[in-house]
Image (cartoon, rainbow, N blue to C red):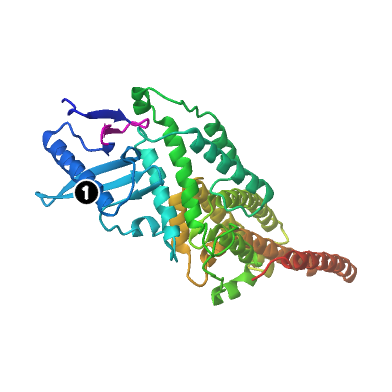
């Protein structure tokens, strides 16, 4: 099939194919080699460009058409009706625009409380840089843009190095990698026409990174009165309120849910997840779960060995055996839950932004936040501690019953000293934690 006159086929570096009319700077992903599709696209192309020119003349506006791209995609509905989807990309002002009324809800739905046009403009600019990623052929890669992107990466790197609550979209390692990629971009003053059409790799790199940066500015309300300057800062003034369930379970779970919920609410702020903090949290949690599983295995073996002692293995069910059985069940529960949580965190994978955000949003409560998730993450450790408590109870009953006064006094004194030191340490640790 032949390409219509005036059009050029371009293969995106990722493999997709699209068509470009260099004279009118029009792009489409539809197969214009089919006559009916080509006629339809050229009709809407001429109509939209003519309407744009008329609007400029009527409103006495100036716009260099050599810096404006048009993306057209007519769609057929109900067999005969045609709806033309389109947008204009203005390279001078770094924005997209339309000739018809456009509802920006599609690009602003992830951010709540939008009240100013300048804030909406950031969302539109992020979509403009996405245009560079999709149709890079005629995007103007200049040294000024490359230098601007380098400055943004350098500033974000410095922000991470000098602040523990950076609101940057990347972590320090990612910023270093991105900066090395951008350093490899070479800008040719006057590249050949055919080369600029075929090689859009640099434009794609710039577009993707800039899109993430500008979208991060949009989500953090840059330039607005309520700008988020730290990743832990809430813009909407949300405060965590503990539920009766948390009040009851927190002491039973040795207040470990309170530690987890503080970390989770620093990760998921205003329905926005910080993937950097989430990845660090998952890595730390997986390490803790693996340690708990190891200790639970040791405790399980200790209970099995303890139950095999002749003085413990008696007919009937003594308090010593019951306590040891409870310790055995608690350690098994800790192991099973730990394995399941480690498997779940690994299945989520690092960098799966959409999946992780959906998972957190589904569990987030309007008043109580991520309490359910915090309780679930606390169960393996709490069950392990309860297993130790039950094992200690079984051990205590076993040595107390046949013991004499001197042995009871010595062991009781040592137990008292150990409990005092443990209580003092726990109080010091919990002083830094808040409800």
The location of residue 62, given as percent across then percent down, is 33, 47
Where is residue 263, by image quadrant? bottom right
Mark 1 nearby-residue class (10 Å; few <14, some 14–19, many ≥20): few
Q: Which residue in the protein does label 1 denote?
A: 51
| Residue 67, horizontal then vertical, whole percent | 35, 39
Q: Residue furthest bottom?
A: 244
Q: Using the image, determine if residue 325 lies above or below residue 162.
A: below
Q: Which residues are magenta?
A: 12-24
Q: Is residue 23 magenta?
A: yes
**Dot 1: element:** helix
Q: Does 422 lie within the magenta span? A: no
Considering the whole magenta stretch, tell me its main secondary structure. loop
In the image, is residue 62 above or below residue 14?
A: below
Residue in view at x 59 percent, y 37 percent: 176
- Residue 30: x percent and y percent? 22, 38
Is 328 left, or right, of 271 in this rendering? right
Q: Give how far across and how far down residue 156 sits, in percent.
A: 59, 46
Query: Seen in the image, is 385 located left or right of residue 36?
Result: right
* Residue 409 vs residue 337, the one in the foreground: 337
Residue 319 showing in the rendered view? yes
Please identify the residue farthest to the left as the structure is shown. 80
382 and 171: which is toward the camera: 171
145 left or right of 394 in image:
left
Q: Quadrant of the C terminus?
A: bottom right
Nearer to me, 96 or 426? 96
Q: Quadrant of residue 387?
A: bottom right
Instruction: Name the residue rendered at 34%, 56% in the picture.
Output: 106
Residue situated in front as seen by the camera: 252 or 163: 163
The quadrant of the image that shows the N terminus is: top left
Residue pushed farthest right?
406
In this orientation, does residue 379 appear?
no
């Amino acid at each position: 099939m032949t390409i219509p006159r005036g059009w050029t086929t371009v293969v995106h570096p990722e493999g997709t194919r699209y068509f470009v009319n260099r004279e009118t700077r029009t792009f489409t992903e539809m197969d214009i080699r089919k006559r009916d599709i080509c006629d339809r696209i050229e009709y809407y192309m001429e109509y939209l460009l003519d309407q744009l020119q008329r609007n400029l003349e009527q409103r006495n506006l100036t716009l260099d058409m050599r810096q404006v791209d048009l993306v057209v995609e007519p769609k057929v509905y109900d067999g005969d009706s045609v709806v033309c989807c389109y947008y204009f990309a203005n390279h001078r002002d770094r924005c997209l625009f339309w000739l018809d009324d456009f509802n920006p809800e599609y690009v602003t739905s992830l951010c709540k409380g939008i009240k100013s046009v300048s804030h909406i403009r950031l969302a539109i600019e992020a979509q403009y840089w996405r245009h560079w990623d999709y149709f890079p052929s005629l995007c103007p890669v200049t040294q000024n843009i490359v230098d601007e992107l380098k400055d943004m990466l350098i500033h974000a790197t410095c922000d991470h190095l000098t602040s523990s609550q950076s609101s940057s979209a990347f972590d320090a390692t990612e910023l270093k990698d991105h900066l090395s990629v951008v350093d490899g971009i070479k800008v040719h003053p006057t590249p050949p026409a055919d080369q600029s059409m075929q090689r859009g790799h640099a434009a794609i790199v710039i577009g993707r990174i800039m899109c993430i940066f500008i979208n991060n500015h949009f989500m953090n309300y840059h330039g607005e009165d309520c700008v988020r300057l730290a990743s832990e800062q809430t813009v909407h003034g949300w405060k965590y309120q503990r539920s009766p369930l948390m009040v009851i379970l927190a002491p039973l779970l040795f207040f470990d849910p309170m530690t987890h919920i503080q970390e989770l609410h620093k990760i998921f702020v205003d329905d926005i997840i910080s993937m950097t903090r989430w990845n660090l949290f998952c890595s730390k949690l997986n390490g803790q779960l693996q340690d708990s599983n190891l200790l639970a295995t040791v405790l399980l073996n200790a209970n099995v060995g303890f139950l095999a002692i002749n003085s413990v293995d008696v007919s009937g069910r003594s308090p010593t055996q019951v306590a040891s059985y409870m310790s055995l069940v608690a350690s098994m529960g800790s192991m099973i839950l730990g394995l399941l949580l480690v498997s779940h965190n690994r299945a989520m994978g690092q960098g799966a932004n959409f999946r992780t955000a959906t998972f957190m949003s589904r569990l987030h409560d309007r008043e109580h936040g991520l309490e359910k998730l915090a309780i679930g993450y606390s169960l393996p450790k709490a069950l392990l501690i309860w297993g130790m408590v039950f094992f200690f109870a079984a051990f205590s009953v076993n040595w107390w019953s046949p013991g004499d006064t001197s042995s009871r006094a010595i062991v009781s004194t040592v137990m008292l000293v150990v409990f005092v030191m443990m209580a003092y340490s726990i109080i010091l640790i919990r002083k830094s934690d808040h409800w």
